[in-house]
Image (cartoon, rainbow, N blue to C red):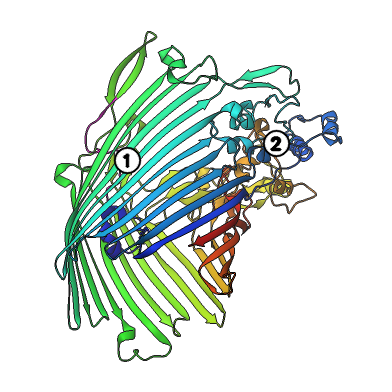
Amino acid sequence: LKDAAAAAIYGSRATGGVIIVTTKSGRSGPPRFNYSGIVSLQSPSRFAEKVSSLDHAILSNEARANDGLPAKYSDAEIAEIMSPGFKDYDWEKALMRHAFQQNHNFSASGGSDRYDYYVSLGYLKQDGIVINSDYERYNIQVNQNLKISDKLKFSLKGGISPSTRTAPAYTGLFDLVAQKPRLHAIQSEDGKWLQHPEGTGNGRNPIALASEDGGQELLKNTRILGNFVIDYNPLPDLTLTGTYGLTNTQTRLRNYQKKITYYQQYSPEEVASYTDFNILSVDNSSSIFQNLNFLASYSKRLKEHHFSVMAGTTAEWYSELNDYVQTRDFLTDGLYTIDAGSGDRNLWNISGSAADWSLASFISRLNYAYQDKYYIEGIVRRDGSSRFAKDIRWGTFPSVSAGWVLSQESFLKDNRTISFLKVRASWGQVGNQNVAGYYPFANTLVQNTVFFNGAPFRGVRPGGAPNPLLTWETKESINLGIEGNLLAGLLEFNIELFKEKTKDILLQLPIPTTFGQAAPVQNAGTVENRGWELELHHRNKINDFSYGITLQVSDATNKVIDMVGTSPRIAGNQITEEGRPMNEWYGLKATGMFQTEEEVANASFQNAITSPGDLRYEENGGDPNRITPDDRVRLGRSDSPLPFGIRMNFSYKAFDLLIFGQGVMKNLQLSQGHTAFNFDRDNSTVRTYHLDRWTPENPNARFPKTRNGQLNNVNTQFSSFWLENASYFRLKNLQLGYSLNTRADGKRNANPIRIYVGGENLFVITKYLGYDPELPGAAIYPLPRMYNLGVNVNF
């Protein structure tokens, strides 16, 4: 549910849209059983390959020569690298692995006219594609419906889901692995962890950190859900409904980082260094979310008129508790309990927090339909939040929608081409109260420890600047839509136009550092979004062959209307300004590469060592004689326009095929080469595509000349050159199934057995050079490619 009128019934939780999930229920009749199981093989889906050890050494020396520095690798060392016995090391392969996953679910359902049930059991075991990681989860769900009488019904749904996740104790592993060239060994021949030259992750070995020698993080999570509903019909057209729901989450996290001994790479018998401490962190938290609803609904049909009325009240409560302790300097890695840590309390870190919020609402809704072709709906809700001060914590949010089924009119009713056609429009408001901190309107104090004459003293300090005037953020939406069914169901379409204006946005504005506290949250700013969505469905059946194709595509643009006097705001490589889209890329405009010294001399001054092969930047209003930050311009949108998806399903007799893919048609993302393509202190993530760099013999190269980076960042300033086309199409799911529809005696099986094979994230089509266009970044956890074998049995 996306438009404000449809989502308004859900209140402040609906500011980003609503996804409704309906759990299964039983049906009257004998017990029915279902088993579904799937086993999968996972592997990393995409890597940007690093250059070989030889290419790395050559490029490193070339970069240093271009900066007037002596070579890093001597002729003898290069000869050694070229020798047949020299080994290249694949750091990504050492960190990642092929991993298995299994998922099993069993359910039973049945019942009578008065009572029905649905019970399900599930088990998931997933070995992580990163070494020393896995995930295991159990889940139990019980749904029951009881009809006491024709007027009174009960529904009870409950479930519990305990899970355990293990992972390496250290973080930032992908970033460290990205810095390791192939010529650095991972371990000595006798299994010792090796330290590497200063500059590559401060010598840290990410494979050692990821292994069991580096420790482990253990996260245990238990989630309990319950929902109780009572329906009472005192009159034939009147329904009274009471609902109580609860979600309880318990989380226990233990992270133990072991002390690692590193040895010299070229003298593995010599100890190089140790990690500072072995550290234990324990983080326990619990939370409870409760909601209580009382609703009255009345529905009546009088000939061609049908109307319904609903009114009620809802309440939500949330509370959480967190305890954290960290200690270090254990005598042995075999005993890591809190009391086994250092006796020096200065090495301890203890903290805790507790928070809660509540929300109360009153709701009313009126629906009216005439001849089942004219529809109108109005909703008014009033919400009060504990996160705002008493006098301004209530907000009123109305909405209205209307629809017209044109295909019911006489001029279209018997049309052979148009089976169904409806136009609709809506306007509505939804409030948002989700703000960091639970009492941002109140003065708060937090504990603080300071040291005086070497001794710790505990006291309190202000927890941040309050804002007693803080109140609701409001999103106002206008939606226009048309949906239809053509050619007796062969083609269905849905077209949506929308405009959203979010006012009084809850955010922290930048303030001078002399203020001395964190900036208060304010109602500041207005942003407008406009866009459209298109969805097409085509279905057909020809004898034993049937198929369906669904295409979805959309686009949206935003514009900042009001920044409360802070426009423009520049944050890193992005700019936000009134009248423009949010977070546009902002940098120098590159116009190519210098090819001659004469071109360098005739251009605006860029850098003292600029020479042929370096990037050339356009002068845009700054100092006309030199390139400065004042020459930066907007370079394009940083969001992802025109996302799309396509789903195709085919069936022929007992066979079925499902294909699903998604992508983005326009996408500008920062190239990994921007931060990677230099050899500063041997810190390098040079990839094979960087081999296409400028040299006098290769003037039309993809990348500029190599630079060491120790002197000046000549080519790594943020510019249009490093913005890359990250549009893509990814095959997300492919599944081929076969249903055993006949029994051994030749009769048709009422409960066919379906077996299938398939895959997820099988391939991606893109020009993006980085790890993954769907998850752009210099060093990220790649999406796993999965190969599946599954079965579904009903009996």
Q: CA distance from mark 1 to mark 2?
A: 42 Å
Is most of the magenta stretch helix, strand or loop? loop
Q: Quadrant of residue 682?
A: top right
**How would you rate the neighbour count of disc 2 (Cα within 10 Å): few for under 14, some for 14-19, many for 20 or more?**
many
Q: Which residues are magenta?
A: 431-446
Residue beneath disc 1? 436
Residue beneath disc 2? 181
Judge from the rendering whether residue 675 lies leftward or rightward of residue 243; answer left or right.
right
* Secondary structure of the residue carrying numbered label 2: loop
> x, y (%) of residue 176?
61, 34
**How would you rate the neighbour count of disc 1 (Cα within 10 Å): few for under 14, some for 14-19, many for 20 or more?**
few
Query: Does 434 appear in magenta?
Result: yes
Confirm or deny contact between disc 1 and disc 2 (CB under 8 A). no
Q: Which is more toward the observer, 198 or 170?
A: 170
Query: Does 787 appear in magenta?
Result: no
Task: Name which residue lies at 64% across and 45% down.
Answer: 98
Label 1 amino acid?
Answer: Ala
Label 2 amino acid?
Answer: Pro
Task: Name which residue lies at 72% across and 52% down.
Answer: 701
